[in-house]
Structures are given as structure tokens and as C-alpha cells.
Amino acid sequence: MSLLGVVALVAAADLAIAGARIRTLDPNLPAAEAVAVRDGRIVYVGDRAGLREHTGPGTELIELGGASLYPGFTDAHAHLFGIGLRERTLDLAGVASLDALLERVAQHAAAAPGPVFGRGWLETHWPEARFPTRDDLDRVVADRAVLLVRADGHAGVANSRALAQAGIGDTTPDPPGGRIERDAGGRATGMLVDAALDPVEQDFLAAYAQQRDGIYEAAGQRSVRLGWTGLHNMWNGHDRVEAMERLSESGRLPLRVYNAAGQGSADAQRLLAEGPRRSASGRIVTRAIKVYADGALGSRGAALLAPYADRPDTSGLLLTQRGDAVALYEHALRAGVQICTHAIGDRANRLVLDWYAETFERVPPAERRIAAPRWRIEHAQIVHPDDIARFASLGIIPSMQPSHAIGDLHFAPARLGRARLEGAYAWRSFIESGAIVAAGSDAPVEAGDPRIEFYAAVARRDLEGRSGAGWHPEQAVEREAALKMLTLWPAVAAFQEDELGSIAPGKRADFTAFDRDLLAVPAAQILRAQPLLTVVDGRVVWRAGAAAGIQ
């Protein structure tokens, strides 16, 4: 064999993809027709003719038939356990009324023995225009515990049996960072907000923790089927790093996971003591800690600078106090651990920015393991306009979920009033100020679909094309910015931009393909795009099949 033949044989790719419109996000070659992969890394990006030099008899060639290929879509904020749990429990997303909710609960209880756990209801569009109560649930299921968690995950309604089992009665005081809703006579209604929800929810979730492997598998399969190649996992209390690593190495968890361990968890303590952790394959990385500053807007737990427009008696809840936050932040900064703080209300966002700034002053760059720590604020939903520029100036990444804007469209004006909408879901303002916006879905709070997140970012309308008065359409972003928000910028937010986020030689081969070009089709067509191919580390983890045009 000639030397040329030996070189060609050695250089042959494991996988080649051709016949595609490739949006690379590589400024040196923004568009291409073909890509080749060897040993999980990209070895060629260019035209179809040049692909021949990188293929051989052992190369798997996938013809995309004119479909579009992108860097792997990454959900920069989601809950892996919660996504899988939604596949196995009572899914209440889209329930149109309180009566419909109760009917679903009754049907589920009749079909399955044991406690009833569900999630996903949202009352803001119900004709009853109110939260459900324990009395509502007792009418359909009284002989066993029932807990129905609101879509945002920060509130839920329990029946009388569940309240009693958790030791919650009419005279139980509100816990720090939580609220037990009560009627005019002081009786607990069954609605529990933030920390008040925890003791009831933990009783239910402990049983599901025994099914953790199957729950993770279900979450991973659903994610890659939609086109996600990676997910930033924002802890929910039942996650376990070792389980993810074991499932990933065995091939049962097919996508890349970047973990933020929960404040106070054993994994968070280990991070602070030992530093960031990486699985053998590199697909499971744990290097961040998740902190909660406040609750959610829909359940009026988000901490606001002024009272809620529709409940002047409350301004929301702070779930972490300054002293506790700054002590943890300082420890993390010295240990090289990233901090991801949940902040939704304008007061919470301002306080977290203040706490970050204070920590940076206490620990100068010379005393940090990482000089530029890339700390994040998760959600950054309602931010006072005066505070938007502080993100970029402090080097803080707003990790935002575009679908929150199109869902909250129907109740945020009532919660906030017109004036505070100026700083709400302000993606373009953040980008123009110099910040990068890492976008995600917050699934299972939202559907967890990359098409919906892309559409929301560029259309800023709900799924039927509607927008509301004062909803600031100027905050919609350009198509390329939306693509970066879901690919390159999540990589930056996870310190992975040298490996992921664009299609360029030498990078890891993570790709997402759709049947149409999200950067060119009319906005409404984005929602009708069909996922065709999901590739992680050069391995096809999901494909639609020949019927969708893949050969």
C-alpha cells in the first residue's frame, strides 16, 4: 500500500454528514455542506467535494437531503429528574379549568392505587380564575394523599390527608422562605408556596427516588428525541452525580449533562471540598452550585422591589439571606466552583448582583482558583432597567428561558403592572449591554422543546401568534443571536466553548438537525420544524429514520 493510501486509511472518518445546510457559528466558515467526525471530534467542515478525502469503507455516511444542521442544541437550564418524572406521573400541563383538573385527578386515582402526585397545572387561564384548594381535592380523593405541583414548581396544592401526614394545620406558622395560604378565617387552603411546599413534596418524591435510573433514562431519551444534545441540570434534591455518570458510561443516558448541585446538598459540599468533577467520558460535568434567592412570579413568590400589582399585601419571598449567600459565595469563589443563583423578581436580581459584587471585592482575582468565574443568575426574569448593565460589568451571565416570556404573557401584566414590564424578559437589552444570554427551557416547568425556545426568542409571541399590550416586542432577538443562545453561549456558560457550541475542526461532534432552516423560515414555521438527527460525541443517539429523508 502506498504512503498516501496509509494516510487516507488512518484519516478515515467514523461518521460523515452531507447534503446539509450547515450553520456552523464558526466565523471563519459560517456555512458548509458537509462535516466529518473521527473519534468523537470534528475533522472536516466544508463542501461536499472535500469530504471524499476524509471518508473510507468504514465511514457511516448520512445524507440529510437538504435539511439543516446546527451545533448541538443545549438546554442551559432544566431539571433532569423532573423531566423524567413528568413522563411517569400525572402530567397536568394544559389542563384548561379547575373542573378539568379535578376530573383528571379522579380518573388517575381510579386507575392507580396509592398517593396521587401530579405537576404542570396553571390557573392563570382558567375560567374559575383562582388557585385550587384542599376542599376541591378532598371532593374527588379524600382517602389518600394528593399533591399537585403548579407548573413553576414553586407552589402546590395538597389535600387534607397530605397536609395531615406532613403535620401542616391551620395554626402551623409559615416557615422561613415559605407561605401557607389561608382563607379569610385563617384556615389553611392547601396551597403551599416555596419552603412551605417542601415537607409535603419530599414525602412524595422519596418513593420516586428509588426509580432514579429509569427516570434519568426517560429524561435523556425525550431530550435527544427533541434535538437536545446537552442539558445544564439545575438540581431538584433527588439528583445523584454517581448515577448520572454510571448511566452515561453505559450508554443509557445519551446526552451531555452539566450539573449545578443544590445548595447544602452532599454533592455541593463535596464540590467545595474537592473542586469540579468530570466523568471518564467527559459527558457528565459537575462544577456549579445552585442557590435560590426567591420564588416564582406566578405563585407570587418572586421578590419584588414594590408590592404585587394584584396583591398589594405581598412583595414576594426571599429564600436566602445575605449572610448565608455571601459566605457560600466566598467559599465557592476560592474553590473554583461556579455559582448559579435563581432570581426572578427585580428585588432578588438586585440583591444577588449586590451579593456577587461584594464577594468579588472580598476575594480578589489573585485569591481565586478561576480569575473570571462566570457566575450566573438563573432566570433574570424581572430586572430593573438600571440593573441590566450590571450583569456585563460584573461578568455575570443571565441564564434565561425564552418560553417563560410567552407563557407569562398572560399573567405577568397583572402581577407587575405595565411599568415593570420594561425590564421583563429583556433578552435584547442584555445582549446589547454586552452580556451573553444562555437560553434554556426550565423543563419540566415548560415543555422543554428547543423549537419553542427558539421561536419565543425571535417572535416574542405565544404559540398562537398573540402578543399583549406593552409586551415590548423590541426585546425579540435576531435569528443568529437565538441560535447562539441555545448553542454557543450555553457552552460559554459551562466553560466549554473550546470543545462545544460551534462546528469547527477539533471540537466535539455534537450536532442537531431539523428538516428546515430555523434561521430562514417564517417564525410560525419554526414550531413545525421536525427534528431529524441528534449526535453526541460523534455518536448518533437519535434519528428520525428514512421516512424523514435521512439515508
Image (cartoon, rainbow, N blue to C red):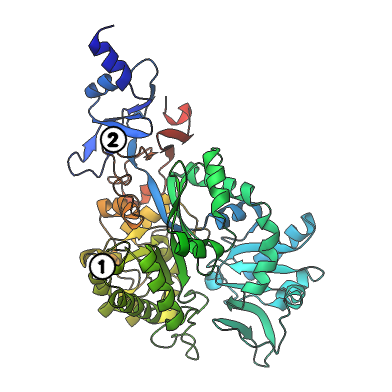
In front of the other: 498 or 54: 498
**Disc 1 from disc 2: Cα separation:** 46 Å
Q: Residue furthest right?
A: 143
Q: Residue at x 64, y 70 (%)?
A: 98
Disc 1: which residue:
366
Residue 405 visible in the shown view: no
What percent of the width, then of the height, locates residue 501? Answer: 32, 47
Q: Quadrant of residue 115?
A: bottom right
Instruction: Name the kind of residue labelled 2 in the image.
Output: Arg
Instruction: Residue 451: give its label.
Output: none
Q: State the quadrant of the C terminus.
A: top left
- Quarter residue 129 falls in: bottom right
Sequence-wise, which precedes: disc 1 or disc 2? 2
Counting from the top left corner in percent of width and height, residue 192 is at 62, 77
Vertical comparison of 298 with 459: above or below: below
In the rendered structure, which amino acid carries the disc numbered 1? Answer: Ala
Q: What residue appears at the point 34 percent right and 24 percent down from the top-left corner?
A: 13
1 vs 2, front mark:
1
Look at mark 2 in the image and give the residue it sits on.
Answer: 21
In the displayed structure image, the side of residue 162 where residue 441 appears, left or right = left
